[in-house]
Image (cartoon, rainbow, N blue to C red):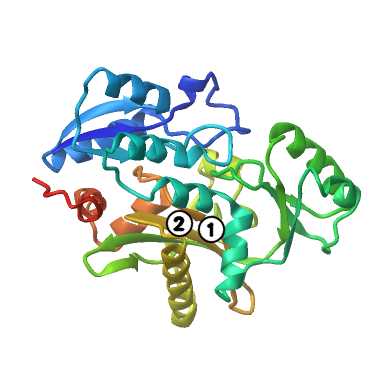
Amino acid sequence: MKIGITYDIKEQYGFTSLDLNFTDFLNVADVSFAKEELEKCGHEVFLLGNAQQMIHNLNQNISVDLVFNLAWGYRGRNREGLIPAILEGYGIAHTGTDSYGCSLCLDKIQTKLIANFLKIPTPNFFCVTKDTWNQFKDASPLPFPIVMKPSSEGTGMGVTLISSDAEYRRTLDRLRLLYPDEPILCETYIKGDEVTVPMLENEQGLYAVGVLSILDAKGKPIELYDANIKTSHTYQKRLSTLPREVNEAVESYSCRLYAFLQGQGYGRADFRIAEDGTPYFLEMAPLPLLAPYSSFNLCTSLKGMSNEEVFQQIIQAACRRYKIVSG
């Protein structure tokens, strides 16, 4: 097949690698890895770039059978849905979730509301918007500690643990300046284990690959999985050793919620596990990182899956959806 790769890297937007306010980008090595793996699978691969570059390339009559979408976009609640929407307009098949599903999953507040509807536990929360600023700007209605984060960012951007009124007001002002068009999600901090659940789709449907625990550098439960930790890689990851019933619960919650959100092909759900064993859903990633250092890649590797097998499963899921006969 002829496969185009879409992606965003910091250099396309003028950011440096040291800027942790905006970290939701791939790097050149991540793109090269995807290209090499797709070529190992026997595909002819074209680099289409970000949304603007992709449109230019498509208008230059670059023809592909399928787009392998790795682009998270920049700014706005629809940024992850932008390339899928453009491809839908062009009538071009793509891997992963569609434009609506990507935008919905990116909105942490909406996914928490849907989790509540499905009776999936999620931390108590409130959100600070332009309309509720005066109501919440001076004091939190939830007891400390709480976690604050912009509602539509990833890779730990803006995630902050708050333990006092002064920290609350200072962080709220900072996040409002950095992410002026986004509600700020404030939720009860869950002390315990951080786990992530990669999901793939096969002929039978969506399934959880496994449960991966995120630990600090000493192998203890990580306090907060924020942008600084994620980008400095000062953590450990291993298959969960939590009780079987806890692992089964987060796997079931992940697939049930992602299916309800109409996620497609592959995805990842993140949870905190309280000290009493209760799993609390945090957020859903419809386009999780597939690079060698990613949680997704590590979990599939530990479960005995090769990179080629993972990429082929993602492609085959897209081919089934679009009724493409893959070669």
Sequence-wise, the earlier of marks 1 and 2 is: 1
Q: Is residue 301 left or right of residue 11?
A: left
Which residue is at a point 53% across and 18% down the rendered structure image? 14
Q: Quadrant of the N terminus?
A: top left
Q: Residue 288: horizontal and vertical position, in percent?
A: 42, 48
Rendered image: mark on residue 47: none
Q: Residue 186: horizontal and vertical position, in percent?
A: 73, 55
Rendered image: mark on residue 237: 2
Q: CA distance from mark 1 to mark 2?
A: 6 Å
Q: Is residue 27 left or right of residue 113?
A: left
- Type of the residue with mark 2: Lys
Q: State whether residue 243 is above or below residue 33.
A: below
> Secondary structure under badge 1?
strand
Which residue is at a point 84% across and 40% down the rendered structure image? 170
* Residue 163 lies in quadrant: bottom right
Q: Is residue 222 visible?
A: no
Residue in the foreground of this view, choosing between 98 and 144 = 98
Q: Of all residues shown, which one is farthest toward the bottom?
A: 245
Q: Is residue 291 visible?
A: yes
Q: Residues within 10 Å of mark 1 (few under 14, many from 20)?
A: many
Whether pointer 1 and pointer 2 mark residues with C-beta atoms closer than 8 Å, the reply is yes
Q: State whether residue 7 is above or below residue 157.
A: above
Q: Quadrant of the C terminus?
A: top left
Which residue is at a point 55% across and 22% down the rendered structure image? 15
- Type of the residue with mark 1: Leu
Q: Residue 127: horizontal and vertical position, in percent?
A: 74, 53
Residue in the foreground of this view, choosing between 308 and 242 = 308
Q: Which residue is mark 1?
A: 215
Residue in the foreground of this view, choosing between 126 and 157 = 126
Q: Is residue 252 left or right of residue 200?
A: right
> Secondary structure under badge 2?
strand
